[in-house]
Amino acid sequence: MSASKNKKLMQGIFTELSKGNDRLFIDSMAEDMKWVWMGSGQWSRTFDGKDEVLGELWSAVQKTLKPPYTVVANNFIADGDYVAVEAVGQNSTPDGKIYHNKYCWVCQIVDGKIRELKEYMDTDLVTRTFAENPH
């Protein structure tokens, strides 16, 4: 797909995510996708394959954040098979903590499916919100 089609795909995904609808996002994941939490700290890790992404990462999102999960994109940059998205979550935890993390997702899209997603986020906010004994 062209850069403009890849960008439109991601814009459509984020239009739906801003409404709390993750169906297009899930349907757009390649079976062999890789989702990488970038960095070198406790929150850095890689989820390999759609099954692991949905079974470990996405199911945890659904448990740790009050439904629906929403995130709003404010910038899309596309070049070839890659689309970078700047976004802000608009979420809270079940116990009422506000969780408005800021993200940059760098997505590789192959044949209309997300093959790789590298996620950059505020890991200090993650720690303060979810760690049992934050430093």
Image (cartoon, grey):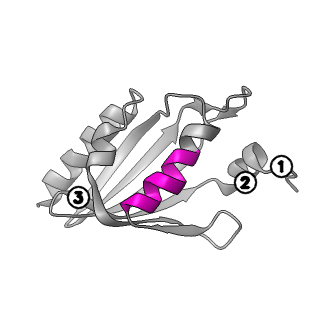
Q: Quadrant of the N terminus?
A: bottom left
Mark 1 neighbour density, 10 Å: few (under 14) some (14–19) many (20 or more): few
Name which residue lies at 38% across and 35% down: 17
Amino acid, disc 3? Lys
Mark 2 neighbour density, 10 Å: few (under 14) some (14–19) many (20 or more): some
Q: Quadrant of residue 19?
A: top left
Judged from the image, the secondary structure of the residue bearing numbered disc 3 is strand
CB-based contact (under 8 Å), mark 2 and mark 3: no
Outermost residue toward the bottom in this view: 40
Give the residue pinned by disc 1.
132
Find residue 32 and report its horizontal and vertical position in percent.
32, 68
The foreground one among 22 and 104 is 22
Q: Which residues are magenta?
A: 50-60
Amino acid, disc 2? Asp
Q: Nearer the viewer, mark 2 or mark 3?
A: 3
Give the residue pinned by disc 2.
124
Give the residue pinned by disc 3.
113
Q: Is residue 15 magenta?
A: no
The foreground one among 95 and 11 is 95
In terms of sequence position, does the residue under pointer 2 or pointer 1 come before the other? 2
Amino acid, disc 1? Glu
